[in-house]
Image (cartoon, helix red, strand yellow):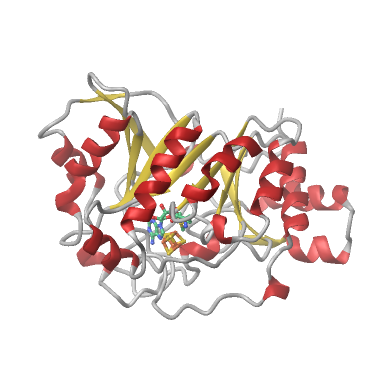
Amino acid sequence: MTPLVDRFDRHVTYARLSVTDRCDFRCVYCMSEDMTFLPRAQVLTLEEIHAVARAFTVLGVTKLRLTGGEPLVRRNILWLVRETARLPGLKELVLTTNGSQLERLAGPLRDAGVKRINVSLDSLDAARFRNLTRVGDLHRVLRGIEAAREAGFDRLKLNSVILKHRNEDEILDLVDFVVERGMDISFIEEMPLGLVDEHDRALAYYSSDEVRRDIETRYRLIPTTETTGGPSRYFQVADTGSRVGFISPHSHNFCESCNRVRVTVQGRLLLCLGQEHSVDLRHVLRAHPGDDARLRQAIVDSMAIKPKGHDFDLSRKVVITRHMSVTGG
Ligand code: SAM
Ligand code: SF4
């Protein structure tokens, strides 16, 4: 039984750890064009991140996701992956990446113990991909996905953020892409995290129900009972080995079953993606180096402030000012 139980009797068994706020892309919904990244002293060292991962697993967390920023641009990331994968009690170590470094790192990541990978891909058109990521090279990412398929991960999944008038006409192409390769895909509604001035989020909103309607013009979707305790709902694509997920923070509330927390690369333990309730683990790590019991106690105590739910509202002018790259998507 996990000691991580909050006031609403939700059991926390899943933690997402951001390993860097830096990235080699500048996706329009995630970052501004001229991002200022954190000074090194504010960023947890790999050893500190590992201490946090260890504390969570001792406290009953069975699934860890490494994310960012782009996790694969952090130097020596393979050391962290290897050491984390070995932690007793951990059932699943997974990673979310933009795929730019996968051609080189897919095999080593698999060998180091990563079970599953999510690759973010919003367009199969090179010019559009460049436009959405501002700098990304589609062909490099596609080569990365091939390398990941060859490396033999348990499952490979694409994550696609759908924006109206930008890529909503590619939904079927993206589903075809995963079906042909036996992969899965999750479609994500854009969340109001960080100020982005490139587009109006309310105007770009394309709901999961619209995405589903588009897919059902070609494919039959069979609902599954599978849940990861988050905002995703999953469907089997009939007569294929693929699944489609919908991550719908706006149109479907998921907070009652929330089983997760996040740690930013500054060591801020965030109890909810859409709220600011947090605990400063970096302070605990640096004021009491090596004191794992104190670190665990800080995590256990944080359960008292896990909020009931998020409060996303696209019409509000005030948004959570943390960018997704800092929070860890
Ligand atoms: N760089 C990696 C990547 O792109 O996969 C990992 C970090 S990224 C922040 C994690 C996921 O968050 C990506 O799938 C990205 O598309 C998604 N994301 C970023 N900003 C978002 C936003 N404002 N709303 C919804 N999803 C967002
Ligand atoms: Fe980088 Fe991922 Fe954010 Fe795109 S979504 S800018 S790849 S962190």
Please tell me in which quadrant of the rendered image residue 209 appears: top left
Where residue 116 appears, as percent x and y from the top left, is 51, 36
Please tell me in which quadrant of the rendered image residue 149 appears: top left
**Depth check: 3 or 266 in front?**
266
Residue in view at x 26 percent, y 31 percent: 180
Residue in view at x 27 percent, y 67 percent: 131
Where does the N terminus fall, quadrant-wise?
Answer: top right
Q: Left or right? Give the position of 170 relative to 140.
A: left
Residue in view at x 15 percent, y 61 percent: 165
Instruction: Name, please, the residue furthest toward the top.
Output: 239
**Depth check: 105 or 113 in front?**
105
Numbered circles on residues, count: 0
Q: Left or right? Give the position of 289 relative to 322.
A: right
Where residue 279 appears, as percent x and y from the top left, is 69, 60
Above or below: residue 202 compared with residue 148: below
Where residue 278 appears, as percent x and y from the top left, is 64, 61
